[in-house]
Amino acid sequence: MADRATPMTTPLEADQSQLQRRETYQMTLFEPFLLRGVTLKNRVVVSPMSQYRAQHGVANDWHLVHLGRFALGGAALVFCEATAVQEHGRRTHGDLGIWSDAHIDRLAAVTRFLSQEGAVAGIQLAHAGRKASERRPWHGETPVDSEDIAQRGEKPWAALGPSAIPYAEGWPAPAAMSIEDIREVIASFRIAAERAREAGFRVIEVYAAHGFLIHQFYSPLANQRRDDYGGSLEGRCRLALEIAAAIREVWPDEYPLVFRLSVTDWHPEGWQVDDTIYLAQRLKDLGVDAIDCSSGGISGRERPQGMTLEHGYQLALAARVKTAARIATIGVGLLWDPKLVDRSIDQGDIDLVALGRELLEDPNWPLQAARELGADGVHGMWHPEFGWWLEKRARAVRRLGIRK
């Protein structure tokens, strides 16, 4: 990758230099990307981040403002948080839902705003499986119990899973799903995709990671079935594949379908990277366009012994999936340095980058990254309602010499 350092110049020369650079070179992170029939203006994706503020699954003004600020901050694709396809598939009482037509209108208000401000609206469809009936994080991330009934009027509900294996110590065992239960889940994902289309979303991501239901099925740590949905690798992957096929039946051909997978369980007896490559190839054949490459989360909140948390620790996983499965990948996890992300895209390790908590701290991260990488030196990428004021201030500060 070419040296992108900028020599010391006067403020006026710097502005002129930045303009010339924008005319002659587009930074990799800020090149458009075509995902099936949808063009993203850059490679920055907002990861789904649960807010636990919904009432009966219905979105409200919190979700509009929360997600809308990322569109104003320059992100290309903004994912709505994990949105339950069945009411008993929620993780918490505060989760968003799309199990009813009553959820469509408020979600449509969000997608309209995102689209008007230049972002593509995406939704993550989810079923928590055995992780359902959990307290919100600030209430303890433990199963809902009598205390929740007394303090918040929120009752627990029965959870389902591939096998009657609890999520973690102290959790109730879920009911092992019948074939009819499985068919109902597949149908719920299909209907949810129809509702997502009606609400104005243009990208679907299926949440098949972090110990949610689909991950529970493909991981041997959670699936001890001996029917067609268990046992062999093919059997454990069957639910993911049938959900992908069901969504593609109703999801517009020009709209992308993404799966978030836990690429590895970080456990010698669990799901492995080669298993993900197999599943990604099968998903691609069914019309899945990209794999959002995360890892872990299958059992409890303790970090697996094999997982080393460091800056960009999952990028190598995404690179391997991209190369071996020949499918677009999204890099995610402890990412904050624009230079690292830019280099990873430039080297072909990933196609898109998804940020979560970094964007919560700074919703303008994409715009700040553009400035740091030299793609925008005059606030030209900012919405003019912001950029005009900021550039006016920048000129005054340079003229007065009062800020380094």
Image (cartoon, grey):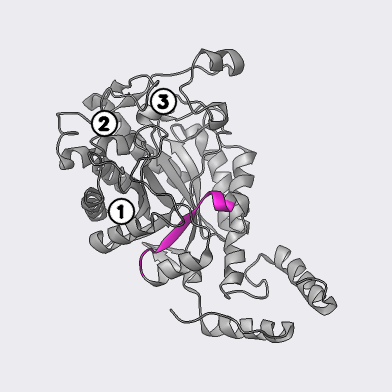
Disc 1 designates what residue? 288
Residue 112 within the segment the image draws in magenta: no
Disc 2 designates what residue? 183
Disc 3 designates what residue? 88
Residue 388 horizontal side relative to residue 214, left or right: right
Q: CA distance from mark 3 to mark 1?
A: 26 Å
Does dot 2 land on a helix, a strand or a loop? helix
Q: Nearer the viewer, residue 110 or 72?
A: 72
Q: CA distance from mark 2 to mark 1?
A: 20 Å
Q: Position of residue 39 (x, y in %)?
A: 45, 65
Disc 3 marks a residue whose amino acid type is: His
Q: Nearer the viewer, residue 23 or 398?
A: 398
Q: Nearer the viewer, residue 165 or 127?
A: 165
Disc 1 marks a residue whose amino acid type is: Val
Residue 354 within the segment the image draws in magenta: yes
Disc 2 marks a residue whose amino acid type is: Arg
Q: Is residue 400 above or below residue 219?
A: below
Q: Position of residue 99 (x, y in %)?
A: 43, 32
Q: Are marks 3 and 1 in contact (CB under 8 Å)?
A: no
The crowd level at tag 2 (other Cα within 10 Å; few <14, some 14-19, many 20+) is some
Magenta-colored span = 348-359
